[in-house]
Amino acid sequence: MLKEYGYVRVGACSSKISVSNVNANVDEIIVNLEKLNKEGVEIVCFSELSLTGYTCKDLFFTSDLLKASLNGLNILKEESKKYDLVFVVGVPLKINARLYNCAVTIFKGEYLGVTAKRYLNSDELRYFESGNNLEDTYITLNGESVLVSNNILYKASEYDYVRFNVSVGNDFMHVNNSDSNLVLALTSNIALINNQDFYHDTINNLTEVNSSCYVYANGGASETSSDVILSNQLIISDVDEVINDIDLSFESKYIYHDVDLLRIENKKLKGIRKDNEYNEVVFDLNKKENKLLKKYNKTPFIVSEKEMEEVMNILSFGLARRVKQLGNSKMIIGISGGSDSTLAMLVCLRATKILNISNENIVCVTMPGFGTSNKTYTNSVNLIKEMGATFKEISIKDACIQHYKDIGHKEDNYDITYENAQARERTQILFDLANELNGFVVGTGDLSECVLGWATYNGDHMSNYAVNGNIPKTMVKSLIRYESNKYDGVFKETLESILDTIISPELLPLDAKGNIAQSSEVSLKGSYTLHDFFIYHFLGYNAGVKKLYYLAVNTFEEYSKEEIKEALTTFIKRFFIQQFKRTCSPDGIRVNDIDICVRGDLRLNSDLSYKLYLSELEEL
């Protein structure tokens, strides 16, 4: 399954080193290769100069060490025939009468290529020539002609997304090949206070900047105690997580992880690639039948408290800027007792503080209708009064009854007309009040509703400014919870009660017990947690429909495969059919990488067909 969905199991190994004892080091590498192969690893890199040790110093000048290194490479090349595993080892090589610190890539009895270290420190210059001074060339390595270049792109013939570079030492900081999805870094950095944190953070940043996964393998504590020790640090950095092992050890250690190179590939399709010239080395990777190790976050849009504060600041300053632009005009907002209008109200509350104006400039309108419950009505009233906003209550019942008569619609026909007439009546009231009070309508619809088209066109779909427009439903609730912790008393209790309320448009009559009869998540055939998960991977990384299903099945044990498939089917249908609503949505502030604004990153035709995408689901 992992073949189809773009995963590759990669590893980093800090092999136990006996300085200058090449035979012992080769034996240890073989032991590790056997273990890694059994674990299903497909690509792995060892540390810098892993055949000899990084600290051989003047022994690098001896012919015995160099000869033993060549013999060790030959043994590893023969050993590689046993495994469907690409591996990279570090070795000193003499090329054109100069000595270079090199990485050799080996696969299935063949040397695929050689990379020489370019950026040397002052001590290394005593022994090695910089790879910057080495032109692309072919050398004879144990009787085989091999390309030596600092610009090799290794590419799997049957899997176009498997493309990687190799670097030695800290050269990985300078690799910027936009055609590569993976960087293998063989290093020998010393253990110092904060040094491991530096490399963790650097690689994490490079992953984001270059849209590439990084595999970092550092030499270990077994090598030397002369002034310094090496850190044993191993890192695998994917686009959404970093595996970081920093424990010192005298023994060999390794890590491995399933990285989603197709996801990287899809992300790069949105960017601008540089025209790089490189030497392409193609190999026939026989991918293994692995089960996915990687665990995905069920709620990828929920961020840390620090980031929540940042989100709230972005939203409130955006709204405050619009209020200021309109001459400190009043903010007109419909309060339903639900989570979306509550978040929008909390943003309004922050905006008044930024502008140092009275909360009375927030005109909160509760508009009870046929589906309004006592709980949501009470929460709406308490919220408005506790915040000191201007309170207005306008029932929509009589107006809707009259409208049903005007258009010849029966009051007991609870169809889409019955529902949408109420949503549009509320929007009409808000816009007319905005004219009356010299204000503007603050929208409450969120990103999830917009993507799914779960809004009444020209009803709750419309406003003058949509503060929640790029906030997914799962994030909406987490932001309210974050804000509620700043309050106490009735206000806090009301916010907690709202969080505990079923998500509903409240457009159908209450049940016999007076409870909300309409659930948005039931209508959408799945929870917003599921739909936000689909949104994150579909819009953020262009995951295919089968892959969306596969990821969800492997992430959500609480839902059956049938439930996930039903929710995904609904997601695809609604996303494609409802685009026309998104294309005329009002302004809203972007807060994360997934931007659905028509003026932003998502450009789509309003007349899309979903048949191709649903046909993929039908094959499952």
Image (tube, helix red, strand yellow):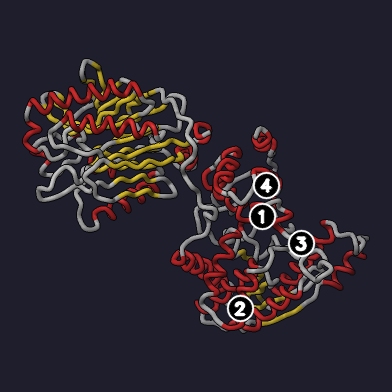
Amino acid at pointer 3: Gln
Q: Nearer the viewer, mark 2 or mark 4?
A: 4
Crowding near pointer 2: few (<14 within 10 Å), some, many (20+)? some
Name the residue: 69% across, 65% down.
502
Horizontal side of 248 relative to 108 (left or right) equals: left
Q: Which residue is nearer to you in this view: 96 or 432?
A: 96
Q: Position of residue 282 (x, y in %)?
A: 38, 23
Residue 168, quarter of the rendered image: top left
Q: Which mark is residue 502?
A: none
Q: Quadrant of the C terminus?
A: top right
Q: Earlier in the sequence, mark 1 or mark 2?
A: 2
Residue 590 lies, with reference to residue 38, above or below; the image says: below
Helix, strand or loop under label 1: loop
Q: Amino acid at mark 1?
A: Cys
Earlier residue among tags 4 and 1: 4
Pick whichever of labels 3 and 4 is earlier in the sequence.
3
Closer to the observer: label 3 or label 4? Answer: 4
Q: Which residue is mark 1?
A: 584
Give the CA separation, mark 3 to mark 2: 24 Å
Q: Position of residue 364 (x, y in %)?
A: 67, 77
How would you rate the neighbour count of disc 4 (Cα within 10 Å): few for under 14, some for 14-19, many for 20 or more? some
Cα distance between the residues tagged 1 and 2: 37 Å
Residue type at mark 2: give it: Glu
Element class at badge 3: loop
**C-alpha gap between disc 3 and disc 4:** 19 Å
Which image quarter: residue 123?
top left
Eyeballing the image, is 106 above or below 261? above
Going by the picture, which residue comes out furthest to the top? 143
Identify the residue position indicated by label 4 in the image.
563
Query: For mark 2, what is the residue?
Result: 493
**Disc 3: which residue:** 518
Residue at horizontal 24 percent and vertical 33 percent from the top: 28
